[in-house]
Image (tube, rainbow, N blue to C red):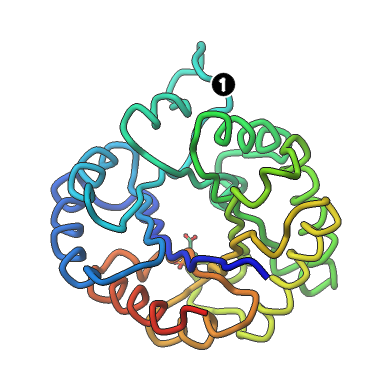
Amino acid sequence: MPERTPYIAANWKMHKTVAEAAAFVDALLPKIAATQHDVVICPPFTALTAVVERRYGTAVKVAAQNMHEDDAGAFTGEISAPMLVELDVEAVVLGHSERRQCFGETDETLARKVPAALAAGLEPILCVGESEEARDAGQTESVLTAQLQADLAAVDSARIAEVVIAYEPIWAIGTGRTATPEQAQETIAFIRDILREHGAAADAVRILYGGSVKPGNAADLLAQADIDGALVGGASLDPRGFAEIVKLTADLIR
Ligand code: PEP
């Protein structure tokens, strides 16, 4: 089975000014100096450069929280993949449930965004996840299957391992309600099976769990065989708490 390097990402959402982002990175870096695995910070667009400039020479990568699927055009308020690459950004979050729910992100646009990110040299962090109603109705698997099949439809199977998938049940995001380690493992193993059916090297794909991950529950989640890391929202805003999650991931490197 291929090695999957653990991956911990901080999704700051619409938090932190440039000054606050700089202070966060200055506080975080000394705490995670020995880290060998992937640590990714996803600041708002305005703070990307401040984080990029501070992380040179460290293990930290920088991701944007969204991008447009076209390289340029009459799309007021949008940002393209080449613009991110020019800033030395390495990755991009796509399809976060807040973008799907609040800003009308669709599987059709994601089917164009994921290959556009890969073509530009950005690592897509593709978020998928079911609503509470879907889980209660026993539709988790059909929702995830539909999202993955649509969002990855135009990605060559040889490149699927370059996509990071974040399984984020919507009912667990920002609610304090976490999927149990068993629920997360079962669902992420299911996602890996879907990727296998897509003809991909599914054992090489990093699949993260996201949804109210904190220092207190991260170890049990990350100990699961198919969970390769975490996408952390609220708990990533504090450099001490985020550093704790990064450090306990290092202890779990398989
Ligand atoms: C997220 O924003 O992707 C997330 C998982 O948020 P939280 O950790 O706050 O639930």
Residue at horizontal 82 percent and vertical 66 percent from the top: 141
Up the image or down, 187 lies above or below 216; here it is above
Q: Residue at point 61% right, 85% down?
A: 181
Residue 170 in sight here: no
How busy is the neighbourhood of tag 1: few (under 14 within 10 Å), some, or many (20 plus)?
some
Question: In the shown orientation, is residue 232 left or right of residue 61?
Answer: right
The residue lying toward the viewer, choosing from 254 and 226, is: 254
Check mark 1 vs ligand 1: CB closer than 8 Å? yes or no: no
Q: Residue at x 33, y 78 (%)?
A: 247
Q: Position of residue 142 (x, y in %)?
A: 85, 61
Horizontally, is 151 left or right of 92 in the view? right
Label 1, secondary structure: give it. loop
Residue 221 sits above or below residue 159 on the image? below
Residue 229 location in percent, x, y?
Answer: 51, 70
Residue corresponding to mark 1: 70
Q: In terms of image quadrants, where is residue 224?
A: bottom right
Q: Is residue 138 visible?
A: yes
Identify the residue at image location x=43%, y=65%.
8
**In which quadrant is the N terminus drawn?**
bottom right
Residue projecting furthest to the top: 74
Front residue (pair 76, 220): 220
Q: Image quarter for residue 36?
A: bottom left
Marks counted in the figure total 1
Residue type, mark 1 in image:
Asp
* Residue 125 x %, y %: 54, 50
Q: Position of residue 68 (x, y in %)?
A: 53, 28
